[in-house]
């Protein structure tokens, strides 16, 4: 058995001290972060008494004209109010414009001169503008887009139903993306006002 080499033990101690110092520094940096749930009951900004949930529940959504836009609107109303419906006296007004694009994604040759689509995709794009309901001042605006794929069977009704189901999926996902964007906009508004 031999004695430990003093140079190696000193180097080990120095490395351990550097590692401990690095850990303490990292903990100090992490403790400075202010991470909190977006949909919590906490106020939007310091000194505010309004929570993110109540801010979202106070958004009224203007009527839309198409079936797929109505699907997005219905999902937003449900998400904003957590199932309670539209507010009686909204603080904010949301103007929503939704467009649709349907494309064939894959073509399969079934005859000599015919190609038959076997898959498609539905893309829903929403442009939104959030305004103060009393003053009409634009608070935020943006654009989000979601694509949903579907199979196109040979039967016409089955193909149509698959497209409707894809529109419904895209509308649900688009509403979730819009809800997150608008919640972030309200948090930014609360932080800039506070």
Image: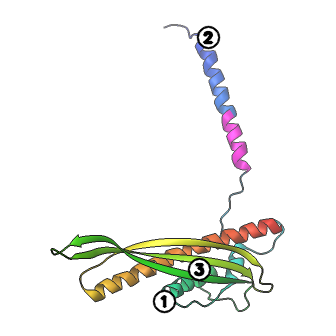
| Residue 40 is at least partly visible in this image | no
Image quadrant assignment for residue 40: bottom right
Seen from the viewer's position, the closer of residues 59 and 156 is: 156
Label 3: how many residues lie within 10 Å, few (<14), some (14-19) or many (20+)? some
Does residue 181 appear to the left or right of 162 in the view shown?
right
Q: Residue furthest front?
A: 113
Helix, strand or loop at label 2? It is helix
Helix, strand or loop at label 3? It is helix
- Whichever of callouts 1 and 3 sits on the residue coming sooner in the sequence is 1
Task: Report the quarter where the C terminus lies.
Answer: bottom right
Magenta residues, start to end? 22-32
Q: CA distance from mark 1 to mark 3?
A: 18 Å
Q: Are marks 1 and 3 in contact (CB under 8 Å)?
A: no
Q: Circle 3 sits on which residue?
A: 79
Image quadrant assignment for residue 91: bottom right
Residue depicted at x 55% and y 86%: 74
Q: Are marks 2 and 1 in contact (CB under 8 Å)?
A: no
Residue 25 among those drawn in magenta = yes
Q: Which mark is in front, 2 or 3?
A: 3
Above or below for 159 versus 20: below
Q: Circle 2 sits on which residue?
A: 6
Label 2: how many residues lie within 10 Å, few (<14), some (14-19) or many (20+)? few
Residue 68 among those drawn in magenta = no
Query: By what rule are the colours in the image chosen?
Result: rainbow
Residue 43: percent from left, percent from top: 76, 70
Q: Which mark is in front, 1 or 3?
A: 1
Above or below for 6 versus 116: above
Seen from the viewer's position, the closer of residues 166 and 53 is: 166
Q: Circle 1 sits on which residue?
A: 67
Residue 127: percent from left, percent from top: 60, 77
């Amino acid at each position: 058995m031999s004695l430990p080499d003093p140079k190696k033990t000193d180097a080990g101690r120095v490395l351990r001290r550097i590692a401990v110092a690095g850990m303490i520094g990292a903990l100090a940096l992490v403790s400075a972060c202010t991470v909190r749930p977006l949909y919590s009951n906490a106020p939007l900004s310091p000194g505010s008494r309004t929570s993110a949930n109540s801010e979202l529940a106070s958004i009224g959504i203007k009527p839309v004209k198409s079936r797929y836009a109505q699907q997005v609107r219905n999902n937003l109303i449900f998400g904003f109010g957590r199932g309670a419906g539209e507010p009686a006296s909204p603080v904010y007004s949301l103007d929503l414009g939704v467009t649709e694009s349907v494309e064939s994604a894959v073509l399969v040759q079934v005859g000599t001169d015919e190609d038959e689509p076997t898959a498609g995709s539905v893309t829903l794009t929403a442009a939104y503008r959030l305004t103060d309901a009393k003053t009409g001042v634009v608070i935020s605006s943006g654009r989000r887009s979601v694509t949903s794929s579907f199979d196109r069977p040979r039967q016409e009704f089955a193909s149509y139903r698959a497209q409707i189901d894809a529109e419904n999926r895209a509308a649900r996902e688009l509403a979730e993306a819009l809800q997150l964007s608008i919640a972030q906009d309200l948090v930014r508004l609360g932080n800039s006002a506070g």
